[in-house]
Amino acid sequence: MKHTPVGPTQRQLRVGEQLRHIIAEILQRGDFHSEALLKAEGITVTEVRVSPDLKHASAYVMSLGGKDMEDILPALNSAAPEFQREINKKSNLKFTPKLKFRLDDSFEQGQRMDALLDNLHYSDQENDG
């Protein structure tokens, strides 16, 4: 029986983490041509997920307080080739993955789950009263 891995491989995780560091460094340096990126301080790269063949990568980002993401995300995606050039220079990868920036809404989802759980009434508690 063949075992199929459920999650990402160690290699995908390692490459993703390397890319996350490089992208964060590029963002911190801040030499962009886009107005949206020049004023976009406090962008956090929360995670980079790499495809099994290492040819595609999704970088999950969030701005401080979630502000201006409707401007920042398209600007990041149009600057993706610049990021890929930098990644190519700084990484030891055979191929530079095609980069796609995505909104990290996991914090927002967590808050929604907390709110749902807070509003949940257990039937056994209601019957004790």
Image (cartoon, rainbow, N blue to C red):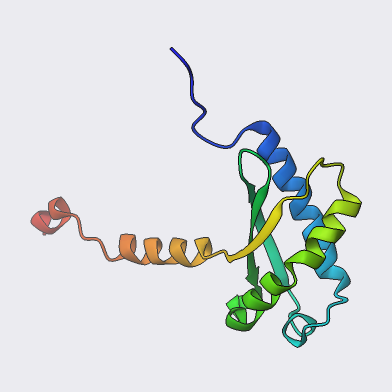
Instruction: Give residue 64's position: percent from left, percent from top.
Output: 66, 75
User: Residue at coordinates 64% horizontally, 61% vertically from top-left?
Assistant: 100
With respect to residue 68, does 105 lie above or below? Answer: above
User: Residue at coordinates 81% horizontally, 67% vertically from top-left?
Assistant: 82
With respect to residue 15, does 77 lie above or below? Answer: below
Q: Is residue 96 left or right of residue 100?
A: right
User: Residue at coordinates 76% horizontally, 87% vertically from top-left?
Assistant: 35
Question: Which quarter of the figure is the C terminus placed in?
Answer: bottom left
Q: How many marks?
A: 0
Instruction: Give residue 38's position: percent from left, percent from top.
Output: 80, 83
Nearer to me, 79 or 65: 79
Q: Is residue 127 left or right of residue 122?
A: left
Quadrant assignment, res 46: bottom right
User: Residue at coordinates 13% horizontally, 58% vertically from top-left?
Assistant: 126
Give the residue furthest to the left: 127
Quadrant assignment, res 120: bottom left
Nearer to me, 36 or 121: 36
Quadrant assignment, res 77: bottom right
Instruction: Give residue 54's position: percent from left, percent from top.
Output: 68, 42
Give the residue furthest to the top: 1
Question: Which quarter of the figure is the N terminus placed in?
Answer: top left
Instruction: Give residue 118's position: percent from left, percent from top.
Output: 33, 63
Nearer to me, 111 or 118: 111
